[in-house]
Amino acid sequence: MVKNIYFDKLLFIIFLTLIIIGIVFLYSAVSIGEESKKSILIFKKEIIIVTMGILTMFLSYTVPISAWKKFSYISVGITIAMLVMVYIVSGGSVKRWLDLGFFNFQPSEFAKVATVLFIAYFTYRKKNEDLRSWSKLFVVFSIPVFLSILIFFEPHKGAALFILVLSVLIISSSYYSFPKILTLSIPAFLIFFYFIIHSNYAVKRLKAFINPMDGSDNSYQVLQSLIAFAKGGLFGEGIGAGTQKLFYLPEIHTDYILALIGEETGFFGVLFILTLFILLLYRGVSISLNRNDVFTQILGVGLTYMIVLQALFHTLVNIGLFPPTGFTLPFISYGGSSFLVSCMAAGILLRVSKEPIKSIFTSDENV
């Protein structure tokens, strides 16, 4: 157990506020008359997931950073095993979930944390070597790219792209050569988009993104999401009073929860949510960079990027600036895997805030 419990209060308040907001708006999203029985089941399940998430956050906080170091490479092995298992045991053309009985778990969500752990630990172990060399850059990119490939062919192209973008952000914030990072990452993204444009399903979504008014089934969600924001105006229609959730906007409690918030609380409600994530970005990065250990620095920065980047992708999808790809809003959207992984990341970040800060006698540099 943790002795002398301490964590950054602002970080904790941000996480707690986001979770409470999620409970409120999930209840609003599913409380829709004719489907009341189903809605009650969804809400009860979410309460169970929230309870599990808070427990996960606490347990993650109690794990020493030294243990996360030892778990870093193991987490990659576990992730690869789960992703391969998805191909073996999942039926149908879409293979994303492992059935754990009480809920379906998405290994692609855990892959995000494994990516952060791997980059942090590899950089920590090699910090006394030439990290600006091509060989080190190839190795640190290899695992994220391999995980992205496995996820891409589930298929879950949005999550695969997320892993690539997250990896580039973390590596660019570390000790590696930025020109060499660009030299490697640009071809990787070009190859990714080459496969995207040769996927009929992805192309349809891209067309819907470019022209949400074309009247096709693929543009329906984008259009309805924009309508939700338009109806909300500056101050919204009131919590619970939104009408887009009445079967106009499918998956509003998961992929489009921000559109619901926009309709019911307006521009200022959405601004408040985004401000919380901006505060999280600032606080998470500043705390992490002030630690005296390279692994802790990169781990904290990487997990902060992970949470905020997902919030950014969710926001861009909801306002029609990114193709629909199934990104949940951390701590707020309904979803077991995403919520538990976000809480795990939050717990580790709170633990990072407990770690010793840098002193004038510390030789490690900022990431």
Image (cartoon, helix red, strand yellow):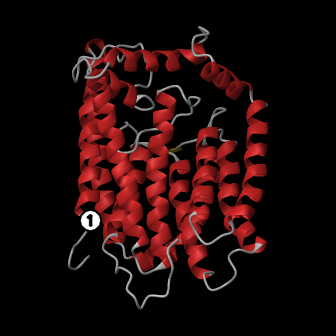
In-image side of 39 versus 75 (left or right): left
Q: Which secondary structure, mark 1? A: loop
Residue shown at 34%/52% (left/top)? 279
Residue 115 in view here: yes
Q: Residue furthest top?
A: 215
- Position above or below: 174 against 161: below
Amino acid carrying mark 1 in the image = Asp
Using the image as rendered, state which of residue 318 and residue 181 is in the foreground: 181
- Position above or below: 322 against 337: above
Picture quadrant of residue 44: top left
Picture quadrant of residue 90: top right
- Numbered-mark total: 1
In-image side of 293 versus 196 (left or right): left
Using the image as rendered, state which of residue 77 and residue 101 is in the foreground: 77
In-image side of 92 versus 238 (left or right): right
Pointer 1: what residue? 8
- Position above or below: 148 against 27: below
Residue shown at 45%/38% (left/top)? 328
Q: Position of residue 100 (x, y in %)?
A: 45, 47
Residue 344 in view here: no
Q: Position of residue 164 (x, y in %)?
A: 64, 51
Q: Position of residue 282 (x, y in %)?
A: 38, 57
- Quadrant where the N terminus is found in the figure: bottom left
Q: Residue furthest front?
A: 360
Q: Position of residue 26 (x, y in %)?
A: 30, 31
Dot 1: few (<14), some (14–19), or many (≥20) neighbours within 10 Å?
some
Residue shown at 32%/18% (left/top)? 233
In-image side of 220 versus 208 (left or right): left
